[in-house]
Image (tube, helix red, strand yellow):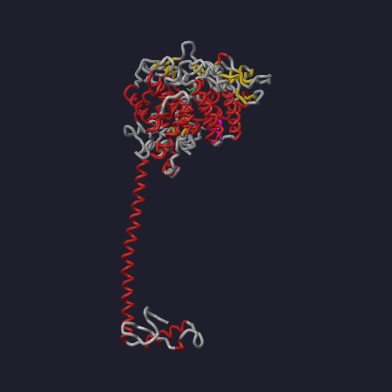
Amino acid sequence: AAMYSGAAAGPPRRDFISITLGPDEAVGVGGYNNSKAWRRRSCWRKWKQLSRLQRSVILFLFVFLALCGVISYTSMGEAWKSITNKSLDDQRTEQEISRLKLANPAVLPAPQKADANHGDYPELSLQKPPKLPHVRRGPSNLQIKAPQRDTRLKTRPDTMRAVEELVEVDKVEKTEKSIISWRGAVIEPDQSTEPPSNKITEPEKPSSVEAEDQKEPVPINERQLAVIEAFRHAWKGYKDFAWGHDELKPLSKSYSEWFGLGLTLIDALDTMWILGLKEEFEEARKWVANDLVFDKNVDVNLFESTIRILGGLLSTYHLSGDSLFLEKAKDIGNRLMPAFKTPSKIPYSDVNIGRGTAHPPRWTSDSTVAEVTSIQLEFRELSRLTGDEKFQKAVDQVMKHVHTLSGKNDGLVPMFINTNSGQFTHLGVYTLGARADSYYEYLLKQWIQGGKKENELLEDYMRAIEGVKKHLLQRSEPKKLTFVGELAHGHFSAKMDHLVCFLPGTLALGAHNGLAADHMKLAETLIETCYQMYAQVETGLSPEIVHFNLHAQKGHKDVEIKPADRHNLLRPETVESLFYMYRFTGDKKYQDWGWEILQNFNRYTRVSTGGYTSINNVQNPSNPEPRDKMESFFLGETLKYMFLLFSDDIDLINLDKYIFNTEAHPLPIWVPA
Ligand code: DMJ
């Protein structure tokens, strides 16, 4: 057998070293002995048989090959090492880049130490006003981008055609540019919103921001595009005829003033941010920076200005990271504080924000229960951001006081409370509609905002829902729709305000947060009822109030409408609940119902020259009798909830991280899930 290349049996040639095996050693000849000892001995014998020269050459070759091996191993190793190092360096750079990307989003500064313990309520996680750059956005590749396609929009009465056109444009543009990154909209509250106590006991959670940031952006769909189109149409009217004023009067091409504070503009700020309307947002921001002045001799309603103005500024601050909005929020928050200077600490309904005086309405010293108990999310957040606990103290005191009051009926509250005595007045009337509605909503939402620790709030909420079940639920005929009626001095009334349609969404939110599963069941039946309040009406739009039929009558539907109640103010509650229901169930029927409602708003309330109007008669499709007013909540709430309803991106305002105030302004949950 050849030992070295080129070696063959036969006499050695000069330039070859060959080993010739004797016939007795050839495999297969004689007996085959392949034992290790035999092989070792046999090799040694061969080696001995070699000439000196042959042995030296073999040894030389051995050493030579060994040296080559060592040299080439070292140089390969170096090359390998540098390749590996380079890729590690690259990875690090990418991580740094992504960290930098993440540093830009609306990030709150680390919370300060809270030194006060507020009884049953969680400690304030106070924060110093952050030092933030003027306007902070995600890095260019992540920045929220106003869809270019919008500039090509044409204003057409027929929304479907407009949508088709949009979709066509979208299809073309999808090939031209990257999809808008909604993660890039930085809709992400900072993890550092946790109260300090939690910071100490709980380790920093792995940054979900980082993980989510790497998610594929969810593209905007056709229905969302239709919402953007509707918003831009509404905004056009506001901009052309009511810029800087409270509300647009789209038919008379003018405006109405309530507080004289640019209510629609402020209410719509975070909607523009969420919809990605960057240009509009920037323009509105300029107005806030240059023209929004709170030092005005004007009476404002404490509740309305809290939920719309304070709430709107706080949420816009969180989404954009722009400190301008926090400064403005502090300003209005401070100016509203005189409302709490009452004998009972139950605030007055009205405050003069220029003079620093407050008063109840002229005819009474009562305040509305829903109003004094639905300002808490905003004032508590203001305390957390400013480090000034006075805001939270004032509103927590109201809740604690209401918690102890008598006059409730299985958790259901009357509609009025006296600012002198602190007692409920007009006892015996219980509703989940006007004047009581958001009391129930804010019990649950404060509990969630504060990290589910404030037991009194939860107790009051759970008891109230039991009260609703016991006293206010009935079923209509013929469709057997479950609805929430009213109780007046022991008498049940089958009347339900459209306002009550916030309830399915709130119940679903509670169930999502671990409360009774039957709350979700109830939510499902109630949202069906709210939808029927639209579907059973000629225009497909709900009236302000309906009365349900308790007895089947030939030719009668479940829903009856009184002449005085047949207006529609472009309210959000049903769409709001549809949004929650879709988020928590994924059932597309909720999106379809919302889509029907949007189309009917476009059919009956859209004004061709810009804007949408409330209408007087939802029962008359040929003349719905436009009222000539676009409420600020149409932009602040209705269109925002529509856009969120149609989205399949659960991180577009993640409900485990944000809590919506009653005007649809998202505020961070202090201890996000
Ligand atoms: C809004 O101002 C708020 O949603 C409030 O809670 C009820 N009324 C309007 C919308 O209908």
Tell me if residue 395 is in the magenta stretch.
Answer: no
Tell me if residue 511 is in the magenta stretch.
Answer: yes
Tell me residue 203's x, y (percent): 44, 44
Q: Is residue 190 visible?
A: no
Q: Is residue 363 left or right of residue 243?
A: right
Q: Residue at x 48, y 14 (%)?
A: 365
Q: Residue at x 46, y 83 (%)?
A: 37
Residue closer to the observer: 487 or 580: 580
Q: Residue at x 33, y 34 (%)?
A: 132
Instruction: In the rendered view, tell whether residue 103 sits above or below residue 460.
Output: below
Residue closer to the observer: 538 or 200: 538
Q: Which residues are magenta?
A: 507-512
Q: Is residue 619 left or right of residue 286?
A: right
Name the residue at the top extreme: 363
Residue closer to the observer: 381 or 263: 263
- Which of the 4 image quadrants contains residue 234? top left
Tell me the chief SS of the magenta region. helix
Tell me residue 673's x, y (percent): 48, 39
Instruction: In the rendered view, tell whether residue 522 sits above or below residue 365.
Output: below
Q: Is residue 466 visible?
A: yes
Quarter in which the N terminus is drawn? bottom left
- Which of the 4 image quadrants contains residue 470? top right
Instruction: In the rendered view, tell whether residue 16 sits above or below residue 415.
Output: below
Tell me residue 189's x, y (percent): 42, 36
Give the mark count. 0
Tell me residue 322's x, y (percent): 35, 31
